[in-house]
Amino acid sequence: MHTEKEEVLSNIGSYEKRCDGFDWGVSKEILSWKDGELLNIGAICSDRVCARGWGDKPALVWEGFGDKKRTYTFDDLKLHSNGFAKLLVDIGIEPGDRVCVFMDRIPSLYFSFLGILKMGGVAQPLFCAFGDESLEVRLASAGTRAILTTQKHVKKVRKIKDRLPALEHVIVVEGDRSKLKDGEGFFHVESADRVEEFDVFPADPETPSVLHYTSGTTGQPKGAQHVHDSIWGQALTTSWVLDLRDDDVYWCTADPGWVTGTSYGIIGPWSLGVTQCVLDSGFTSARWYQFIQDHRVTVWYSAPTAIRSLMRDGEELAGKYDLKSLRHLASVGEPLNAEAVVWSERAYGLPFHDTFWQTETGSIMIANYPGMEIRPGSMGRPFPGIEAGLLDLKTHEELTEPGKVGLIAFRPGWPSMFRAYRGEPEKYRGRFVGARADATPDELRTDTGLWYVSGDRSSIDQDGYYWFVGRDDDVINTGGHLVGPFEIESALVEHEAIAEAAAIGKPDEVNMEVVKVFVTLNAGYEPSGDLELAIMNFIRKRLSPLAMPQEIEYVEKLPKTRSGKILRRYLRALEWGEDVGDLSTLEDD
Ligand code: PRX
């Protein structure tokens, strides 16, 4: 009988073997893709899988609220993505236009995402719990021409549409057609005419594909632009790190409004022709276990916040379900604490394999590679072909001594790397250490003498394992989702009662961090429970439930630098009980 490790090794080979003489071309081999063939992520994830003879294979096993269940084959995926692609062409969307997908995790989200790519459009998925302000900022930045949404969410679009001159088309894909307003379109792909064949847009490797917005410390969120070439990084990491095989039933719990939900919840697995499950209903441990049991899920990619919630509900609950189908578990988004790894071995007989990457990197960069010894609490080692290092926090010199804390950095050149922050070339350049001031984006992405700096701190042990330390900026990571303090502060000061505001992350047992804000009030306003609730709701509705403060502290005045910038780091250090250090260094701008 094979041991688990031998089985893994026979499938994907050892980490060392894979690093040796690595070439990204191996990804093309895995997909049996020959140079000169049509390149288009939308088609590779649907038409091409059908052409391999897997048209009848389930592609999407879907469950929604209220016991709704549907299964779609790869033939269905091809047909329905064609339907969306044709719709977009018919209404005049051109290749390169941004088309926003703003809906719950309903099947049409997946069909339309692929359809947009098939016609050469840029898919801009946005988390549907975003309020109108979060939505507006991202649609304005992208110059989005069309938005696909549902009756449930279209109200938010209506509120902002007049301020978005580029937004010509609002199309509702689910709900009641009679409730539409003038100028809105309705398209239900499953009742529309069948589109058996669609003339897929032949993408160049550098043709824009997906645009994901991500929050930073300063300013509004930035649009990380990805291209069709990303498929090679996504397919290979899905195969090797998530260890997906032809007969797997895979569940990625992430929403495609975030990069995990597209790179590993759409593109990677479907490019390999793997069956995916999607659960579009709220979290309870019991519901999740039932889902795994019912669909015989074999590979599960989730996040530490979810794992900690499952832990809280205990091993006994896990023991009530048949979870023996599970073969491989992985996690991403936040630090995966060692206890969670140990617990999952006890509860499921399998450890979670931590992986590290970012919206900007597009694919997994550091991982607990299958078959490699797991060191609980460590993110693992760089994916084969990824040259990673740590840079000194101040000088940006490469650190070589084990145990030293530095900034995680990667040599440019991997396929899934982002190609731009939309409309912000300076910010893009700013992510690379060693770049000439006049370096073009093309030079930046190919110059292997540079470092792309992640903005996260880590140490490396003597065997090359990375140990996450924390972020190097003020971005708040709540439940694996990044929230920009600036966005929250800008929204807060729009509230009539608030004069000034600072937002930080405060520790939370399950979500790692939740938002806490410090505010000063305008004359005539007094702190009160009602005001607190009003402020919380104000943020929840405008931005999102994630950005909603869990705590509001009223202060007389906020700590500032000499030039007047609010000292979030000082507030954060106090909150976390860390050494506030020398205030004069904090006061540096
Ligand atoms: O701070 C790191 C954290 O999440 C950030 C990236 O967030 P985002 O661009 O939204 O993409 C999330 C999913 C790919 C990182 O800069 N992060 C991600 N993975 C880990 C992590 N922090 C600790 N451990 C991880 N495994």
Image: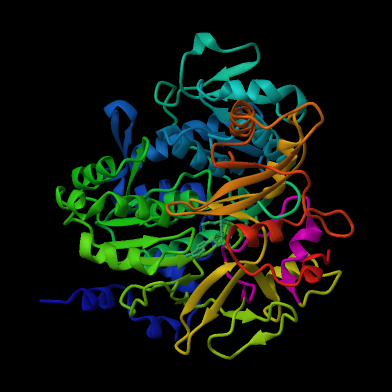
Q: Up-down: is 113 above or below 357?
A: above
- Could you tell me residue 33's position as x and y percent? 45, 63
Q: How many marks?
A: 0
Residue ranking furthest to the right: 563
**Residue 143 seen anywhere in this rendered image of the structure:** no
User: Is 477 situated above or below 404?
Assistant: above
Q: Residue at x 70, y 71 (%)?
A: 581
Dividing the picture into quarters, in which one does residue 102 lie?
A: top right
549 left or right of 142 in image: left
Question: Does residue 19 lie above or below 302 as drawn?
Answer: below
Q: Nearer the viewer, residue 68 or 502?
A: 502
In the orientation shown, which residue stands out farthest toward the left? 1
Q: Is residue 27 visible?
A: yes
* Residue 113 located left or right of residue 292: right
Does 254 lie within the magenta span?
no
Q: Who's the residue at 19% across and 43% down the image?
A: 294
Percent across and percent down for residue 446 are 68, 72
Left or right: 506 in relation to 489: left
The image quarter containing residue 65 is top left
Quarter assignment of residue 216 = bottom right
Q: Is residue 415 magenta?
A: yes
Residue 196 % position (x, y): 42, 34
In the image, the segment drawn in magenta is 407-433
Image coordinates for residue 351, horizontal then vertical, percent: 29, 67
From the viewer's side, name the closer residue of 494 and 447.
494
Residue 129 vs residue 335, the one in the foreground: 335
Quarter of the image with the C terminus is bottom right
What residue appears at the point 73 percent right and 30 percent down from the top-left corner? Answer: 495
Colouring rule applied to residues: rainbow
